[in-house]
Image (cartoon, rainbow, N blue to C red):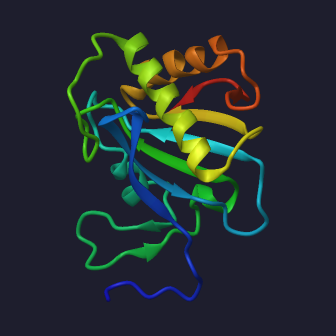
Amino acid sequence: MLFRSPVSIEMYSGNIPIDTGDPSRALFFVFQPTVGSPVDEITIWLNGGPGCSSLEGFFQENGRFIWSWGMYQPQLNPYSWVNLTNVLWVEQPVGTGFSYGNVTATNEEDIAVDFANFFLNFQTIFGISKFKIYVTGESYAGRYVPYISGEFLDRNDTDHFDLSGKPTFI
């Protein structure tokens, strides 16, 4: 075991289908609940690319631990976003990183619909509803974030898509 932590780290990852009736297309995610008192909010982190793995953000920027170039083992990240909120890193669109399936999206609107469907399935699996949602990212995510945010708002469903704050990108 390379990494020993003085604290227990709760984390979930895997693929969740975009359409539960057709599991042939799925997005890969890593989810870490906040450290400390639970909060009824979630921050979604997207890397850009297009097609850049959001594991880059998870491992090298804002995840619970850092494992960057030249490091022989991971280290706890004292500045991790999970110190403040629940964080969901998603590899999207379909075909990025560990996400899989036939690429059918031809524009950002299609990608946003896929993402919203994935996120609804994510909420169902984890029993999350009525959470404030923040969507953010870097690089080409500056294109994805507004479209995904717009799709959330268009669904007019504050139980599952209660977008909070303004879309931001780094």
Residue drawn at 38 percent across, 14 percent down: 110
Instruction: Say whether residue 6 is left or right of residue 29.
Output: right
Instruction: Say whether residue 105 is left or right of residue 45.
Output: left
For the residue pair 161 and 21, the one nearer the viewer reads as: 21
Indicate the position of residue 116 as horizontal and vertical percent values. Answer: 52, 26
For the residue pair 53 and 66, the one nearer the viewer reads as: 53
Residue drawn at 75 percent across, 31 percent down: 159
| Farthest residue, direction front | 21
| Residue 27, image quadrant | top left
Indicate the position of residue 16 as horizontal and vertical percent values. Answer: 41, 44
Indicate the position of residue 73 as horizontal and vertical percent values. Answer: 31, 79
Residue drawn at 26 percent across, 47 percent down: 98
| Residue 107, image quadrant | top left
Residue drawn at 51 percent across, 66 percent down: 11
Indicate the position of residue 35 as horizontal and vertical percent values. Answer: 67, 67
The quadrant the N terminus occupies is bottom left
Q: Eyeballing the image, is 59 above or below 72? A: above
Number of residue marks: 0
| Residue 25, image quadrant | top left
